[in-house]
Amino acid sequence: MMSQNKTNLQLNQNQKRQGIKKSPAYLLPFLLLFPAVAVIILLYLQPFLASFWRSFVNKQGVLGWQNYEVVLSRYLQDVYFTFAVTIFSTIVATILSISLAVYIRLSQGWLHQMVTVLYRLPIFLPFVVIAQMMRSFLAPHGILNLLLAHFNLIDIEKPLQLFNWIGLSFGFVWKEGPFMVLLIVGGFQMIDNSYIEAAKSVGANLFQVITRVLIPMNKQTILVAVTLVFCSLVGCFSFPYMLIGGKTPATITIDIAHRVNYFGDYGVANALGVFTYIMVSILAVYYVLNMRKGLYE
């Protein structure tokens, strides 16, 4: 009798499973995911695979390593330059953004309100506008050098030369820093005041509150901000092109535009693009692994 009941129960379970599989509701999750997956395939995956494949095809249509040989012989310094400036700008922007976000989170008063409004202004300016502003501000006889000369800090006949990696990093930080602040402040605002008060009650100073309460509890948001800014700086073209032009070293995006516009050499341009993919993928893989780890904690 008991064995017959077990057999009937198993038959009912099998029928239910088959019914679920045959039911249209079983396909609903796949239908909901299809638009997002299709957009990723059409706009990201397909162009990436096409660019990667064409990086091995030279102008004569022959497969080989000629394009990468050109990159390594002529543009390796620019690859290092792009990576170094991007890393440096991202680190500086992260430190300054966390500092300003902490101030906005913990302070009050009229100065706090003014800073809260002013820091958002660069977010809405495109890089082309930023480039024109920086050309006027950082020029040999621009606003910055004239201001420094007014206070006798420099000789105006020997001004600071800032149309290089220094000016490039300054513009990157000025443009992307506020965006990072906006994200990080949002994460800090979600931390309840009770955690901060508890830390202060056991003797924690401001530095310990920042490093042991605010930053650890907002780590994921900071990582998102760093990833977005790093990827944005690697692919930025208009600002480096307008600021440093044809100087050496230059960024990879300038080299890509030069190979396409003046030589019509899409093979070398795609090979240069592969190096940008590698730079971005390093941080992207770390970001995905970190986010996946956070889901299981």
Image: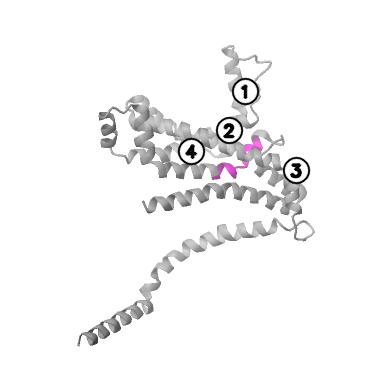
Q: Is residue 118 above or below residue 154?
A: below
Is disc 3 placed on a helix, strand or loop? helix
Residue 64 among those drawn in magenta: no
What kind of residue is marked 3?
Arg
Give the magenta-colored segment's residue range. 231-242
Q: Which residue, given by chain and number where applicable, does mark 4 sit on?
A: 123
Front one among 103 and 201: 201
Name the residue rendered at 56%, 38% in the picture: 87
Picture coordinates of residue 31 (x, y %)? 43, 68
The residue labelled by disc 2 is: 169
Q: What element does badge 2 sit on? A: helix
Mark 2 packing: few (<14 Cα in 10 Å), some, or many (20+)? many
Q: Amino acid at mark 4?
A: Ile
Marks 2 and 3, how far apart at CA: 23 Å
Residue at image coords 50%, 45%:
228
Q: Counting other residues with Cα less than 10 Å from the Cα at mark 4, is it few (<14), some (14-19), or many (20 or more)?
A: some
N-term-proximal mark, 4 vs 3: 3
Q: CA distance from mark 4 to mark 2?
A: 16 Å
The quarter of the displayed image where residue 17 is located: bottom left
Q: Which residue is mark 1?
A: 142
User: In the rendered structure, which amino acid carries the disc numbered 2?
Assistant: Ser
